[in-house]
Image: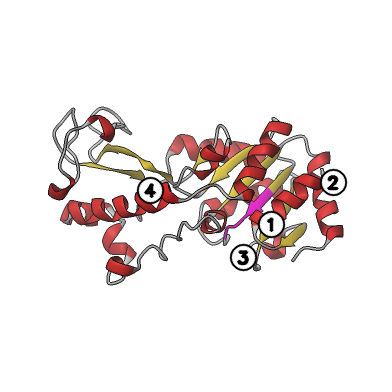
Amino acid sequence: MADESAIQQAAAMIRASRRTVALTGSGISRESGVPTFRDALDGLWARYDPQELATPAAFRANPKLVWDWYEYRRAVARQAQPNPGHLALAELQRRLPQVQIITQNVDDLHERAGSTDVIRLHGSLHGSRCFYNCQGDPTPVDVAALDFDPSNGPPRCPHCGRWVRPDVVWFGELLPPAQLAAAMDAAAHADLMLVIGTSGMVAPAADLPYLARRGGARLLEINPAASALTPAVDLWLQGPSGEVLPRVLAAL
């Protein structure tokens, strides 16, 4: 666990920053009980491979199977609550309006904790859109407003009558261009990046800390174990974000 001198050093880094960016990964959500993408393949879903459930081809082949898996994941995420790490980041945003959050997660725990203007690289479990983007890319669909029987598969798009899909990024798909551009701009102009609960192995999100560093930013990592990014950071606070971030906030 990070010692007090490291906590004080991290607080000083944040205090000196004029534009802080926080990049969060699955680790911060795991602390709230939200399993990682592959960890979610347990119980009834243990016999499936992620490639069978999270590709456009998989959805075309068996839309009900894919929709049902995402319904299961939505239910798990809805039951979870923001943990002290989420709450500390939201409080940091309130104290320092220049703080921008970029997340690889598809749950809504940052927003429920009170964070605003979160850049979502991989979409949202709680959003849906037309699989064919019949009214433009994307074509959002409010599933709550539709009358459909989930036992028959996904709802139908109210515009074209074809399948509605989860608004998340699947294997083989590009990240949402506007979100990626916003993330790259934030990283390029940051003077401090907090790297929280991410393995640093999933591109292009994993490239953002290096983009920030090329622009002169310092890198502060908060993770229980070393990641692929650890050798490149200026300071690593070892420990869960739910324990470390409140200590850093208190030190401010």
Q: Secondary structure at mark 3?
A: loop
Residue hosting label 3:
228
* First reached walking from the N terminus: tag 2 or tag 3: 2
Disc 1 crowd, CA 10 A, few/some/many (<14, 14-19, 20+): some
Q: Residue at x 66, y 68 (%)?
A: 226
Between 214 and 125, the one nearer to me in the picture:
125
* First reached walking from the N terminus: tag 4 or tag 2: 2
Between 136 and 148, the one nearer to me in the picture:
148
Q: Where residue 37 sits: x, y (%)? A: 42, 60
Q: Which residues are magenta?
A: 194-198
Quick check: 1 left or right of 154?
Answer: right
User: Which quadrant: the N terminus?
Assistant: bottom right
* First reached walking from the N terminus: tag 3 or tag 1: 3
Residue 248 appears anywhere in the view? yes
Disc 3 crowd, CA 10 A, few/some/many (<14, 14-19, 20+): few
Q: CA distance from mark 2 to mark 3?
A: 25 Å
Residue hosting label 1:
243
Q: Where residue 206 sits: x, y (%)? A: 57, 55
Residue 195 lies within the magenta run: yes
Which quadrant would residue 88 be assigned to in this image?
top right
Q: Is residue 35 above or below residue 112?
A: below
* First reached walking from the N terminus: tag 4 or tag 1: 4
Residue hosting label 2:
12
